């Protein structure tokens, strides 16, 4: 049975495997600080329906409290270990909405439903909520293990032991961009994501984390830097990982993988 994936924009995806719905890093906002949603409509209410939600790290574009408040009561929320201590607002939202929060460290695994399991894996990214805050919580990726094995990288840089720590996967959801042309340490651009793809060697891949939210004014000045990463990743993947099928969905589009 193939995995069905809907890309809602940025790092927000619905992954459906064996009848189980998982939602990654939900961000349902029109604006976030200096950023504005420039591509794709705000996801509809159906996007907030999930058996489990996977949150990769504490940055506000990945752990967005108002978006978590849209989840149905009883939804299971998987977060990095230490998240509730590092971000008291998370416990408040979870309490108000009746969310079931489970904290995980890299290497730990939980059952979701109907044989589908989720394993937390290491990421190389600053997991702090604020740039100069204390390091209370690591960034994670996740591998969804059902009929297929789907790797959601969250935010991460390329690292030597990536393939070993992630393990064999069938589908990879890889970040390929950010807010502009220059990405600091702990990120993948299109080129580094293609290198990661060559190491991971899945059957299929989808680029995410690009082209949705732009800083004010940048859509008029350098729009190509926000449109280009997905297609650039696809082009480079043909060179570095020619056996991998790359799909580049539109915002809100549902695709079958692998």
Image (spheres, rainbow, N blue to C red):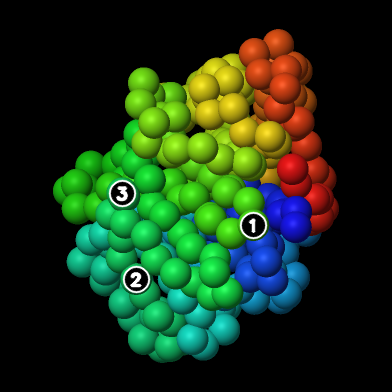
Disc count in the image? 3
Residue identified by numbered label 2:
102
Q: Earlier in the sequence, mark 1 or mark 2?
A: 2
Q: Alpha-carbon neighbours of circle 1 within 10 Å: few (<14), some, or many (≥20)?
A: some
Q: Describe residue 78's horizontal placement relative to residue 73 as left or right.
A: left
Q: Position of residue 201 (x, y in %)?
A: 59, 27
**Mark 2 and mark 1 in contact (Cβ < 8 Å)?**
no
Camera-near label (1 vs 2) is 1
Q: Alpha-carbon neighbours of circle 2 within 10 Å: few (<14), some, or many (≥20)?
A: some
Residue 208: tell me if it is visible. Answer: no
- Residue drawn at x 54%, y 65% is 116
Residue identified by numbered label 1:
147
Q: Describe residue 24's horizontal placement relative to residue 161 as left or right.
A: right
Task: Name the one closer to the observer, 63 or 248.
Answer: 248
Q: Is residue 9 above or below residue 192?
A: below
Residue 106, labelled with which disc? 3
Q: Quadrant of residue 205?
A: top right
- Residue drawn at x 72%, y 22% is 243
Q: Which quadrant would the N terminus be assigned to in this image?
A: bottom right
Residue 196, labelled with which disc? none
Q: Describe residue 75's horizontal placement relative to residue 226 as left or right.
A: left
């Amino acid at each position: 049975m193939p995995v069905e994936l809907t890309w809602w924009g940025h790092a927000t995806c619905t992954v459906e495997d064996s009848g189980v719905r998982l939602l990654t890093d939900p961000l349902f906002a029109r604006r976030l600080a200096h950023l504005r949603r420039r591509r794709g409509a705000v996801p509809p209410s159906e996007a907030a329906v999930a058996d489990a939600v996977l949150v990769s790290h504490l940055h506000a574009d990945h752990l967005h409290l108002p978006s978590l408040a849209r989840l149905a009561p009883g939804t299971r929320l998987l977060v990095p270990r230490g998240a509730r201590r590092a971000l008291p607002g998370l416990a408040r939202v979870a309490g108000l909405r009746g969310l079931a929060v489970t904290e995980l460290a890299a290497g730990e695994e939980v059952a979701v439903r109907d044989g589908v399991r989720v394993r937390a894996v290491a990421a190389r990214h600053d997991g702090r909520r604020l740039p100069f805050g204390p390091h209370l919580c690591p960034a994670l990726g996740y591998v969804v293990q059902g009929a297929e094995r789907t790797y959601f990288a969250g935010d991460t840089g390329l690292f030597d032991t990536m393939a070993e720590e992630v393990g064999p996967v069938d589908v990879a959801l890889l970040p390929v961009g950010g807010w502009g042309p220059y990405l600091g340490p702990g990120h993948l651009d299109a080129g580094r994501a293609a290198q990661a793809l060559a190491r991971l060697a899945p059957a299929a891949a989808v680029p995410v984390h690009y082209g949705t939210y732009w800083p004010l004014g940048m859509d008029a000045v350098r729009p190509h830097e926000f449109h280009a990463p997905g297609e650039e990743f696809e082009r480079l993947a043909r060179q570095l990982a020619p056996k991998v099928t790359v799909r580049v969905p539109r915002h809100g589009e549902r695709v079958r993988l692998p």
